[in-house]
Image: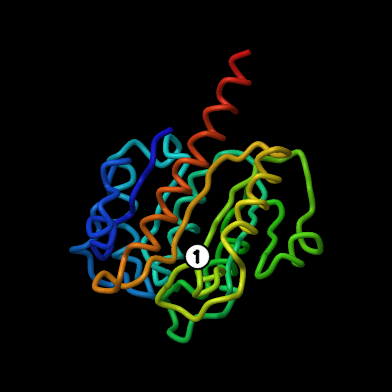
Amino acid sequence: MDILFCDFTGVYGNEGILRYGDVLDLKSLSGTKMYIDEEAELKIREKINGLGGPAGYKLRFLDNGNYHYMTRILASYEQDFFDLITFDNHSDDKVPEFSGLKSCGSWRLDIREENPYLAGSALIRKREDFEKNYVPSDLPLYISIDKDILSEEVLNTNWDQGEMRDYELFDMLEMLFSSRDVTAIDVCGEDLPDAPIEANRLFNEKLIRVISGKMKRETEQVRR
């Protein structure tokens, strides 16, 4: 399975995990932190197109939560109807404070307004939300994870965090993969580059192992 690292801050290099995939180097771009302007988005899309688009990358890492708007950008390349399920401690559906800009806090609102292929959208902030908000369907599923949903006892992010444990998140991912065709999964929620990295590195490596295994089994089942 091909993996894409959207590298805004250099944090993945610090974690030593860039060897697992390809790198979209975005560190030199201005107009990207929390808010994104039209010029920056155009440059990001040019870089994505230079890789042949994101379709070949089933697992995408988006850096810290300031760049969660990348889900909206990457999902805009979907060419068929899909459902979106988001694991996040924040709703990310607020109108941006600055006119003409989109943000990490508005992307779920923006994607609903912009993406003609988005059929359903569910937000999971804690385990109980999964049973309440998740509606199964036959459509492909796009999964977006912000690690700030996890407790600080698991790892640290640069945003305020929820109380979910990592095993709870992996249990829900297992249920989704066992019942749905997952078209892509992206992950944000790194800490700042100069913060301790060990817990985030270990989580990311576990996620890579788990998701790679599930995607491999799905491919084998299709071939049969």
Residue drawn 61% across and 74% down?
163
Q: Residue 221 in the image: x percent, y percent?
A: 63, 21
Q: Is residue 93 found left or right of 190 in the rendered image? A: right
Residue 183 sits in quarter: top right
Q: Residue 140 in the image: x percent, y percent?
A: 66, 40
Colouring rule applied to residues = rainbow
Q: Which residue is mark 1?
A: 147
Locate the N terminus by quadrant: top left
- Of 164 and 109, the residue lying toward us: 164
Residue drawn 41% across and 75% down?
101
As drawn, 94 above or below 140 = below
As drawn, 174 above or below 73 = above
Residue 165 sits in quarter: bottom right
As drawn, 6 above or below 158 = above
Locate the C terminus by quadrant: top right
Q: Is residue 110 found left or right of 180 in the rendered image? A: left
Secondary structure beneath label 1:
helix
Q: Amino acid at mark 1?
A: Lys
